[in-house]
Amino acid sequence: MLAADFTRLQDEIQMVNDSAADWLHLDVMDGRFVPNITFGMLLVEAAQRLSTKPLDVHLMIVEPERYIADFRGAGADVITVHYEACPHLHRVVQQIKETGAKAGVAINPHTPAGLLEDIIEMVDLVCVMSVNPGFGGQKFIYNTIPKIRRLRDLITVRNAETLIEVDGGVGLQNAEKILQAGADVLVAGSSVFKADDPRKAIDRLKDIGGEIERFA
């Protein structure tokens, strides 16, 4: 939703409701963990009232453990925190799960996938940042493709059910490579909301996923 027109928020969310998209992804930024400030619980709560899709809330904030219950109360179905912001990650993941939400862990482009080895079976989702977090509209960092493969191998070896989400610079130009590397979930912002026909852009991304053998 970071790329949406916030003067037409209801219409933008209704477009997602009417589309083939599975989730609504909301980026919460605090101006400390990342050099940008977006929105907090009030907008998540408004989105929850308008959306018919689950809310995937990505907390790009320091001390996320202070706000887990609040974001769950606002309507978050998936709560993702950053590995880099959580010195006690295991505890924070447990905290998210205790609220009834799905627990996600995001890793920045420079963070090795292997650092999640001891927690991979506990989390529902790993969000691979394919841009430096903080701003929409950035170019995809292709060095994250091998990281997606390493995560897929780790999940397979551990027989985990963890989803791999890729966030940043995702669009029709790279969706196939990302999915072939082992991703399950594509976060598409500018490539959807800035498209001439956003619903058609979503349909095309879904079609690419359907063409990948692993998703057939």
Image (tube, rainbow, N blue to C red):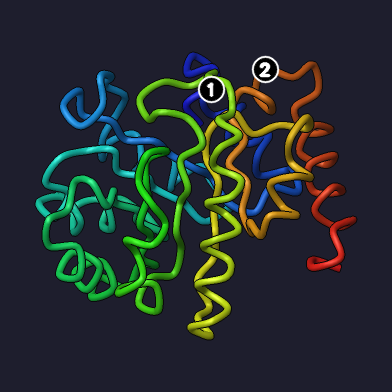
Amino acid under label 1? Ala
Please tell me in which quadrant of the rendered image residue 134 appears: top left
Question: Going 58% across and 41% down the picture, which residue do you hit?
Answer: 187
Count of numbered badges drawn on the protein: 2
Q: Is residue 109 visible?
A: yes
Q: Write down the residue under mark 2.
A: 194
Question: Going 81% across and 23% down the picture, which residue do you hit?
Answer: 197
Image spot of residue 93 (x, y percent): 25, 67
The reply, left or right, for residue 70 in relation to residue 141 is left
Using the numbered discs, state the Cα–Cα distance from disc 2 to disc 1 in whole angstroms: 7 Å
Question: Going 73% across and 35% down the picture, which residue do you hit?
Answer: 174
User: Could you tell me which secondary element the residue under label 2 belongs to?
Assistant: loop
Amino acid under label 2? Lys
From the viewer's perspective, is residue 181 above or below residue 61? below
Image spot of residue 65 (x, y percent): 13, 55
Q: Which of disc 1 and disc 2 is earlier in sequence? A: 1
Residue sitting farthest toward the bottom: 159
Image spot of residue 91 (x, y percent): 15, 70
Is disc 2 surrounded by few (<14), some (14 to 19) or many (20+) residues within 10 Å?
some
Label at residue 157: none
Question: Going 54% across and 18% down the picture, which residue do you hit?
Answer: 137
Q: Toward the viewer: 90 or 9?
A: 90
The reply, left or right, for residue 15 in relation to residue 189 is right
Q: Is residue 46 visible?
A: no
Residue sitting farthest toward the right: 211
Image spot of residue 3 (x, y percent): 53, 22
Label at residue 3: 1
Quarter of the C terminus within the rendering: bottom right
User: Could you tell me which secondary element the residue under label 1 belongs to?
Assistant: loop
